[in-house]
Image (tube, grey):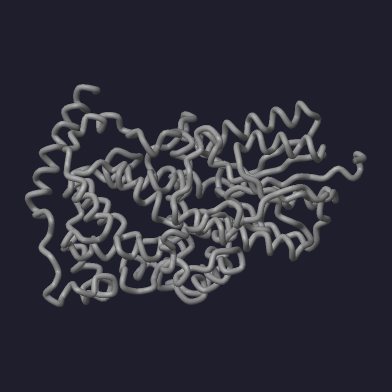
Amino acid sequence: MTADTRPAVVWFRDDLRVADNPALDVAARTGRPVVCLYIRDDESPGVRPLGGAARWWLHHSLTALAAGLDDVGARLVVRSGPAEAELAALIAELQPAALYWNRRYGAAERRIDTAVKASAREAGIEAESFGANLLFEPWTIRTGSGTPFSVFTPFWRACLSAPAPRKPLAAPQALTAGPSVDGLTVDDLDLLPTRPDWAGGLRETWEPGERAAHADLDRFVTDALARYRDDRDVPGVDGTSRLSPRLRWGELSPHQVWHAVAGARDRDDAAANSAATFLSELGWREFAHHTLFEHPDLATVNIHREYDSFPWPRLHPSVLHAWQQGRTGVPLVDAGMRELWRTGVMHNRVRMVVASFLTKNLLIDWRRGEEWFWDTLVDADAANNPFNWQWVAGSGADAAPYFRVFNPELQRTKFDPHGDYVRRWVPEWDTGDYPEPIVDLGESRRAALAAYDTVKKAGAQRA
């Protein structure tokens, strides 16, 4: 293959979209044939295997991506295996001129990127990575002394003082497909559940893919944004954006979401106030990823190490199972857990309640909850999922103090006063067949605070 016709390879990861994809945009601008590649890299050292709900979403999002690329003249090549080995084999086969991809921020992913970039350049191949999935790269937002932020409010203030997020890039109108190479089908990745097929609720709830993602964004900005500030905490109404899985899989970029929401601020005061609130939620997503960048073991190690001394008791597995199955006898907790199992998501207010209940009323290690969410959430990612669990548990960055225990009954009467949300997911709640709570909320709260004394003493000793 001559130098003039050597292809550019675009390596897709958590950016399953054609529009506003910097790596694909740069490849298109070279005028070279383009080979679009996805590698299922669960076998790469240190890469965390996906949970079941995430695998379901990935199957359908990859299928949609392949169709979107086909519309502009390209083909998605699918492979599976350790990323470095698969890329080395493809490079040996194609002798490409360039390799482009968009960054991820976990430790294993960064190690892979560094190794791939070094080996490609050693072979004389242009190798570049791009910022595509965050508004602000982690190394660009720092305190005045050059250290990373550990508190959200000054972090977000620094973000808002930085240059504004770039405008989204248009999708390439046409690509020249690169040479044909061997690959798998999406079905070959064996991502869907079959024995049993438990994904019926996911199919009823979601349509993965870039086209559906833009429809969701348009719906939110047009119909729900003005009410977002007031409705976002009410689980019984459709008041949230439902964009979290779209951002997790990169069917939408945060830049697309940012500019769509910011562009609606001038409609009226309600839209302006809600837009500011929603953009700060994008800020929490940024903060989680920046925290992962600084704490790559976020899913397993307490950021505040004094929590290593927390005396998690050894409880019977049936207690954890009751929480997982939504059979605790606490209505709001059970509703949230059943919503999660059925739809692959849970209302954010309820996520905080069920996490507090697990870690403080049941005294179960936050890591067990993080693992369950990792397996059952369609939007679980390496940053937000553990960041949020550590936040509720008190051990994370800018975390809620441990003594802040969400009372699920008070939360229900405040945010679901008519029981709309609970009845939807726990229809037996007010029929007389609903069980008593598996723990007493008051007694378990007092036990949690007594256990927390161990953490306070450890913190004092460290100080």
**Furthest residue toward front:** 195
Residue 240 image point, x, y percent: 41, 67
| Residue 271, visible in the rendered structure | no
- The quarter in which the C terminus is drawn is top left
Residue 97 image point, x, y percent: 82, 39
Residue 8 image point, x, y percent: 79, 45
Lateral position of residue 410 relative to residue 167, left or right: left
Q: Give the residue at x 44% y 53%.
A: 52
- Name the one closer to the observer, 278 or 4: 4
- The quarter in which the N terminus is drawn is top right
Residue 437 image point, x, y percent: 12, 59
| Residue 411, visible in the rendered structure | yes
Q: Against 87, is 185 above or below?
A: below
Q: Give the residue at x 44% y 64%.
A: 199
- Name the one closer to the observer, 384 or 343: 343
Lateral position of residue 220 relative to residue 436, left or right: right
